[in-house]
Amino acid sequence: MTTFDDKLVPLLGKKSADALEAGLGLTTVGELLRHYPRRYDERGKLTEIAGLELGEHVTVQAKVKSARQRRMKSRSGELLEAVITDGTSDLHLVFFGRGSRKVERELLPGRKAMFAGKVGVFNGKLQLAHPDYEILDGAEGGAEGGAASGADNAAASKFAEAFIPVYPAAQGIQSWNIARCVEQVLAVWDGVPDEQDPLPPSLRAERGLVPLEKALRDIHRPDGWAAVAVAQQRLKWDEAMAVQLALAQRRRSATARPAPACPPRDGLIRDAFDARLPFQLTAGQREVGEQIARDLSGEHPMNRLLQGEVGSGKTMVALRAMLQVVDAGRQAAMLAPTEVLAAQHARSLRDLLGDLAQAGELGGAEHATRVTLLTGSMPAAQRKKALLEIVTGQAGIVVGTHALIQDKVEFADLGLVVVDEQHRFGVEQRAALSGRAGGVTPHVLVMTATPIPRTVAMTVYGDLEVSALRELPQGRSPISTSVVPVAEKPQWLDRAWQRIHEEVAKGHQVYVVCPRIGDGESDGEEPPKGEDDRRPPLAVVDVANRLAAGPLKGLRVDILHGRMAPDDKDAVMRAFAANEVQVLVATTVVEVGVNVPNATVMVIMDADRFGVSQLHQLRGRVGRGSAPGLCLLVTEVPEGTSTMQRLRAVESTLDGFELAQLDLELRREGDILGAAQSGTRSGLKMLSLLRDEDVITAARAVAQRVVDEDPDLRAHPGLASLVAGLLDEERAEYLEKA
């Protein structure tokens, strides 16, 4: 019998099995059969070229428009330049070396073929460099140097069928290779006996779902669009149930634990703080504050996600929650993702509280507490003092990085943990903290400035209650955003540097953000572009040197990145906050929490290399004072690409919730969970968080019902195997930590 667990080598041969493992991480029959087609091409129907994603490995069906040989300009040898079309848009191909002569004989104008490769850009035009290809109109295809070989008669006849499954592919293993491997495996696979189908018969009958074996055969070899739809619906339910069962189990275990009850107390620090506020809380802040106050009063742990626009006042909500906990005689800890941000939070909390944060000091208020900072790189004497304040309870509010949950840190009575922009805070960390909270589990409040669509909240943050702040406090200045298309309008970048001089002349400051750090050894010249690929992403060190010696000469320029020593980072941020640094060239270390109201301009270099939500968060660092903010998105990508579409969307709106929905629409399916966000394997391959809200909602209800009746799924071994199979250890851990 051939089962899900069988290895692929005996079935496919070592060469094909090795290619599947190296390119896609597929080693068993089950993994290959769960590697679903991304789409289906109908024979003769050309793939839409407009909107291809830069850097993505794509497979397109297109018609050859032209192919011509020429000598290379920068080095000896020849190359073949070809143009393929879908009838509306063109895509350029380039082939290098002696094999290009053979390619020229095969890629005749008018011929249709499948082409596969990584989308790049050269001279402002989308291109595939040395792509693999498979001729679809009778001739054998291929190019030298790792391209596809000609199909045998059986495989060629498969390609002649109406439906061509197009699989997520990788270097060294193309979609058509995967299709042939699937064909071989399906021919010997013994299927799934009905009693081993992970979804119970009652659920399949209730939802009209086909058996797993039929779904898997039809998803790879459908006989029509109706079969595709039926198979997809069944496989979506597998994924939705796996995720929702895991989350339902998490919710159940969370509510079963005791928590330190922290009801509000009148006449103490929080009331004193509220009485001093120089402004009114927004309606959203008041509403969310009341929700959190009720949660903190309970005897089961709060697990709440607070999402809100950059500048919507999440820190104020969190501080009032921490003060409620302090008033109840317990401690609150605030975790930040970086030491720079932790130090800034500690300073800003002290500034907000004033003498309310000066317990035991001359001039301290009658009812006061102490804000203590603890980071991993503090000098020994400072660290010892901080640890003493924490263990004795003198520190009502403790701010730090994950150094706070190390073994040596002991809290007197921990009641609340606030996690700022660090979602991977889960079961191990909660267990570590509960050991320091007298055997109870602290309440947890996770804050994010990245708005989250409802389906993502149900799927990724499904064990958390979700609150949202949608309105901005009064006094926030508007931010205008403009795309700077360097390839088409290089003079716009010159104008951007002039604008920086103008802002600095007014006394303002500027961020310049780059995708990477750099090694500091560059001579300042931009890395050369190859004829077949994009240049490396711009680096902080190189850009800072180039700007200081060139367009921003005369301004005080400094750098900030994650590899700097903590003291150096803190010194730079203090200098920037004091306007001793006029232009700060940084990585995304400035993305969250950094608050310099005098900064009015942010220039994001290689903006196409950042996500929509990240760009939105970055630009939220400007316009935080009385002067309006300006964000410039510098890019070399051409118009008409989906990448430029993303940048134009960021340019057109300041609504983070709208952008979050757009970000979801533009993502490839299945890149939501865990480490698979940047990889090829994911727990969500079929389920669309954008289009399948009905399936997610229904599966959530079914999963909750099942877990209420059978928490450990002992009576449902199929469902238990579904959770274990689709949510491997790493991904399950991610869900725990969401």
Image (cartoon, grey):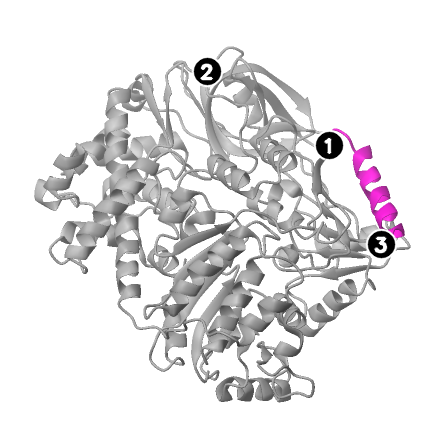
Image quarter where the C terminus lies is bottom left
Q: Is residue 88 above or below residue 382?
A: above
Q: Is residue 572 left or right of residue 551?
A: left
Tag 1: residue type?
Ala
Give the residues in magenta: 486-506
Q: CA distance from mark 3 to mark 1?
A: 23 Å
Q: Is residue 431 above or below residue 131?
A: below
Tag 2: residue type?
Lys
Judged from the image, the secondary structure of the residue bearing numbered disc 2 is: strand
Judged from the image, the secondary structure of the residue bearing numbered disc 1 is: loop
Q: CA distance from mark 1 to mark 2?
A: 31 Å
Q: Nearer the viewer, residue 118 or 352?
A: 352
Residue of label 3: 548
Please tell me the numbered disc located at residue 112: 2
Residue of label 1: 487
Q: Position of residue 569 (x, y in %)?
A: 70, 68
Q: CA distance from mark 3 to mark 2?
A: 52 Å
Crowd around label 2: few <14 · some 14–19 · many ≥20 (10 Å): many
Image quarter where the N terminus lies is top left
Q: Is residue 488 above or below residue 561?
A: above
Crowd around label 3: few <14 · some 14–19 · many ≥20 (10 Å): some
Helix, strand or loop: magenta stretch: helix
Judged from the image, the secondary structure of the residue bearing numbered disc 3 is: helix
Q: Is residue 732 left or right of residue 59?
A: left
